[in-house]
Image (cartoon, rainbow, N blue to C red):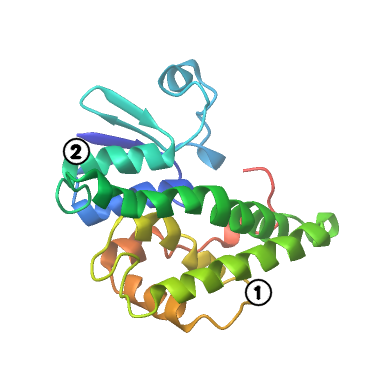
Amino acid sequence: MLRIWGRRNSFNVQKVMWLAGELGIAHEHIPAGGDFGGLDTSEFLALNPHGRVPLIEDAGTIVWESHAILRYLAARFGAGRFWPDDAGERSQFERWMDWSQTALQPAFLSDVFWGFYRTPEAQRDWSRIRRGIEHCSAHFLLLDRWLKGRDYMLGDHLSLADITVGTTLYRYFNLDIPRPEIPNVQAWYENLATRAPYREHVMMPFDDLHGRLAY
């Protein structure tokens, strides 16, 4: 059985759990990181020398790094549906996967979610936060233009593009920060929220992270 290590309120773990839910993969979830600890043990470091989650083990195959895990699960369990044979087709979602990791995620997760929500008020760097909010606005306005006429990132079907980019939406729309008018992103978010795996694994309360840098 597939085993998944991580804490459920971890942003990167949520991507993996969401895809596992969409694929209907029977798995064992092993709480790790945060209050659960365990990432600095010799046993865990033997699996992932970086001491981070998510981490999976599938019939002896160990994979770490969230997007590497997504690609592995899609190829292993979702061939055709999430992992087409054609390299050009795969590139359509892989571009957005890389963009989400190198552009959207640093702006939102690092500068806004960490800088604003997870940092105690007295320690906030408002120049960094405002910069992050501006970058997020630009990224989401780009997405809004892209999503016009589309139900999902690549048209009419869920893909790894939706999973990597769409995981940000629940937190983005529930933070007390200024946001631009992005009706197409809002409609996409509402569409994702109709999916049971998204509701179960992404739309989770994150109040316990407020003002908490160490976790």
Q: How crowded is mark 1: few (under 14 residues within 10 Å), some or many (20 or more)?
A: few
Secondary structure of the residue carrying numbered label 2: helix
Measured in 3D between alpha carbons, the distance from the residue under mark 1 to the one under mark 2, in whole angstroms, is 39 Å
Foreground pick, 200 / 154? 154
The quadrant the C terminus occupies is: top right
Choose between 113 and 70: the one closer to the eye.
Answer: 70
Image coordinates for residue 124, horizontal then vertical, percent: 80, 57
88 or 83, which is in the foreground? 88
Please tell me whether residue 143 is drawn above or below residue 168 in the rendered image.
below
Q: Mark 2 points at which residue?
A: 76
Label 2 sits on what residue type? Arg
Residue 31 visible, this angle: no
Mark 1: secondary structure: loop
Q: Tell me the residue at 52%/27% (across/down).
A: 51
The circle drawn on residue 176 is 1
Residue at the image point whose x is 28% and y is 37% from the top: 72
Q: In this view, does 187 lie above or below 60?
A: below
Tell us which disc is closer to us: 1 or 2: 2
Q: At 48% from the left edge and 67% from the top edge, which residue is drawn?
A: 169
Q: Position of residue 170 (x, y in %)?
A: 48, 67
First of labels 1, 2 by sequence position:
2
What's the residue type where badge 1 is placed? Asp
Q: State the image coordinates of residue 34 (x, y, percent, origin top left).
A: 55, 41
Which image quarter: residue 109?
bottom right
